[in-house]
Structure formats: structure tokens, C-alpha cells
């Protein structure tokens, strides 16, 4: 079953090839594990007054369905998603990064996030990741999204 988004850009912002010793269902499992993760980073304040803030970044992962729609991908629905996947092929994801920070009163304040399309293609032991920002101000670079995916693949590898 192909899971390719029909509007994926011809020239994505980031593309990288990696040697890979697992199958496509493993990649989907890794992506489901990334859903719900969060961390902190330093960025410019959303009020554009030239100051920096420590912000929280939360990740939501979706997988394409029928080449036009995306739906949530997480550990709860992983089994039904990987049931129809081949060991090699292409799967598209959408990753939404939500940002927030604590103001002076320690209230969490959300601000504009970034969204990315991610294409994972696996063929003959080579994983190609293509990442393209489709929304947001670019507080997170496309290459950083690919790095996060690869870091999770390495961290969860059975022989690591």
C-alpha cells in the first residue's frame, strides 16, 4: 500500500540519504514514537522585541491516508497502520511543531508553530528523508527534523 501525499513538493528544502538496516514498518514505528515528544530550545521572542526566550517545542505526527488526508499517528493506532505496509516503499508524514513559553507570571503562552511534510523512502537498504516546511516562521529548520528522526532510529535500534 502506498502512502504518498499528492502535493509533496518536487524540490524539498532538505534531502539526505542514509544506510538503513530495517524495514518501512520500523520507520513508521519510530515516527509514532516521536508523536507527543517535547523539549526546550532557545528562540526569538514572539513579540519581536529582540529578546530570546526558552520555549517548549511539542511534536505531533500524522501519516498520509489515500494521498490527500492526514491522520494522527501514535502508539495507540500503530498496529493498524503498519498492517498493510510493504517492507520497502515510500511513506509521507506531516509533523506539526507547537511552541509555547512561560511568561513573567509563569503562564504558558502558545505562539506560531511550524509544520513540515516528511517523505521517507526505503529502497535496497537506503533510506531517503525529504523534509519541507509548509507553514510557520522556520524556528526549526528542515534539517533538524531529519536529524530528530535519525536520532530516534539510532536510539531505538535493537543492536545499538
Image (cartoon, rainbow, N blue to C red):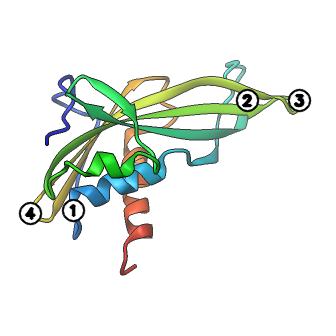
Task: Pick whichever of labels 2 and 3 is earlier in the sequence.
Answer: 2
Task: Give neighbour class at mark 4: few <14, some 14-19, many 20+ (Cα, 10 Å).
Answer: few
- Which quadrant of the structure image shows residue 29? bottom left
Q: Nearer the viewer, mark 2 or mark 3?
A: 3
- Which quadrant of the structure image shows residue 62? top left
* Residue nearest the observer in this picture, 48 or 99: 99
The quadrant of the picture occupied by the N terminus is top left
Residue occupying the far left of the picture: 124
Residue occupying the far right of the picture: 105
Q: Percent position (x, y) of residue 59?
A: 52, 40
- Up-down: is 81 above or below 5? below
The residue singled out by tag 2 in the image is 51
Asked whether, in this view, residue 30 is left or right of residue 89, the answer is right
The dot on residue 23 is 1
Task: Give neighbour class at mark 2: few <14, some 14-19, many 20+ (Cα, 10 Å).
Answer: few
The residue singled out by tag 3 in the image is 104
How far, Cα to Cα, is label 1 from label 4?
10 Å
Amino acid at each position: 500500500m502506498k502512502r504518498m501525499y499528492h502535493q509533496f513538493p518536487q524540490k524539498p528544502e532538505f534531502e539526505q540519504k542514509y544506510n538503513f538496516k530495517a524495514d518501512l514498518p520500523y520507520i513508521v514505528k519510530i515516527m509514532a514514537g516521536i508523536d507527543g515528544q517535547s523539549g526546550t530550545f532557545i528562540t526569538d521572542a514572539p513579540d519581536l522585541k529582540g529578546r530570546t526566550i526558552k520555549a517548549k517545542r511539542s511534536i505531533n505526527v500524522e501519516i498520509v491516508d489515500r494521498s490527500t488526508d492526514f491522520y494522527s499517528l501514535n502508539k495507540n493506532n500503530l498496529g493498524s497502520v503498519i498492517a498493510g505496509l510493504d517492507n520497502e516503499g515510500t511513506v509521507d508524514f506531516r509533523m506539526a511543531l507547537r511552541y509555547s513559553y512561560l511568561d513573567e507570571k509563569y503562564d504558558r503562552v502558545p505562539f506560531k508553530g511550524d509544520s513540515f511534510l516528511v517523505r521517507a523512502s526505503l529502497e535496497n537498504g537506503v533510506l531517503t528523508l525529504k523534509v519541507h516546511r509548509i507553514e510557520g516562521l522556520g524556528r526549526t529548520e528542515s534539517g533538524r527534523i531529519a536529524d530528530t528522526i535519525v536520532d530516534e532510529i539510532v536510539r531505538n535500534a535493537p543492536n545499538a
